[in-house]
Image (cartoon, rainbow, N blue to C red):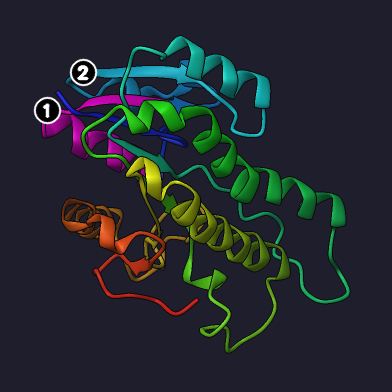
């Protein structure tokens, strides 16, 4: 049975990923900060194991990796994310900027560093970093959103470096843009449903090969410029 580890699995895209993989017979390791309150996650039928995890907590991440030492991880989906206050030039909360980097940039790298051997011992060996087109320097035509944009641009840099550093282990690392999705972060008026986003990402994940490592993909499978 293949294994997938998902952070931020209690709602939105993370929850939809957990549901989708469970339906397909995967063992789902679902992580969130408050699993006791994750009613929808608990209700998923299938082989789903819940873990209490804050990706900014280095000791807890390391502890979970030790706890799961005998579990190969075919796919690690670094989905946990934080948008933060939508502040513009002249209004930046620098403490919040630091926290945003803790979740969006440092968290995914911390997960990979701690679970690298779990990935290397699996069949699939794939890391999916959920980024955003807002992290693309070339696609930025409107400015603003300094905090979120910079955290996702930095995540893309992490993806690129990991793709080089982990190549010898056969681990593929990609960044993905889920689209402007109808989540708490994206808002109810967003043009892409959660189902459409995750369906597209599942198709992309299924066809990604080692040759694709270090790439930045849209949920429809097309590439996005850095």
Identity of the residue drawn at 56% across and 69% down: 135
Tell me the crowding category of disc 1: few under 14, some 14 to 19, or many 20 or more residues within 10 angstroms, Cα based. some
Identity of the residue drawn at 16% across and 57% down: 207
- Pinpoint residue 80: horizontal percent, then vertical percent: 51, 42
Q: Nearer the viewer, residue 218 or 127?
A: 127
Identity of the residue drawn at 45% across and 27% down: 31
Could you say which disc has been placed on residue 25 in the image? 1
Q: Residue furthest bottom?
A: 141
Is 78 contained in the magenta span?
no
Q: Residue furthest front?
A: 168
Could you say which disc has been placed on residue 47 in the image? 2
Tell me the crowding category of disc 2: few under 14, some 14 to 19, or many 20 or more residues within 10 angstroms, Cα based. some
Identity of the residue drawn at 30% across and 54% down: 194
Circle 1 sits in a helix, a strand or a loop, which is it?
loop
User: Along the horizontal axis of the image, is 197 left or right of 1?
Assistant: right
Q: Nearer the viewer, residue 50 or 209?
A: 209
Q: Main SS of the magenta segment?
A: helix
User: Along the horizontal axis of the image, is 210 left or right of 147?
Assistant: left
Q: Are circles 1 and 2 on residues that touch, CB within 8 Å?
A: yes
Question: For the magenta stretch, what is the residue range?
Answer: 13-30
Decide which of tag 1 and tag 2 comes sooner along the chain.
1
Number of marks in picture: 2
Q: Is 144 located above or below residue 94 in the figure?
A: below
Q: Is 77 located above or below residue 175 in the figure?
A: above
Circle 2 sits in a helix, a strand or a loop, which is it?
loop
- Pinpoint residue 36: horizontal percent, then vertical percent: 47, 15
């Amino acid at each position: 049975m293949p294994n997938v580890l998902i952070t931020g699995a209690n709602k939105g895209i993370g929850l939809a990923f957990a549901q989708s993989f469970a339906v397909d017979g995967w063992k789902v390791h679902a992580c969130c900060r408050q699993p006791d309150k994750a009613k929808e996650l608990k209700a998923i039928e299938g082989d789903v194991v819940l873990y209490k995890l804050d990706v900014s907590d280095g000791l807890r991440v390391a502890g979970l990796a030790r706890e799961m030492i005998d579990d190969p991880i075919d796919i690690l989906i670094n989905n946990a994310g934080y948008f933060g206050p939508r502040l513009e030039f002249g209004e930046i909360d620098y403490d919040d900027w630091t926290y945003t980097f803790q979740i969006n940039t440092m968290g995914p790298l911390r997960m990979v560093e701690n679970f690298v051997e779990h990935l290397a011992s699996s069949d699939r060996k794939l890391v999916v970093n959920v980024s955003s087109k807002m992290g693309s320097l070339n696609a930025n035509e409107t400015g603003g959103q300094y905090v979120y944009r910079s955290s996702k641009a930095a995540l893309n840099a992490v993806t690129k470096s990991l793709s080089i550093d982990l190549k010898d282990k056969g681990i593929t690392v990609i960044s993905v843009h889920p689209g402007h999705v109808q989540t708490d972060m994206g808002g109810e008026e967003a043009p892409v449903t959660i189902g459409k986003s995750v369906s597209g990402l599942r198709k992309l994940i299924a066809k990604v090969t080692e040759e694709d490592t270090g790439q930045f993909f849209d949920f429809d499978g097309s590439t996005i410029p850095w």
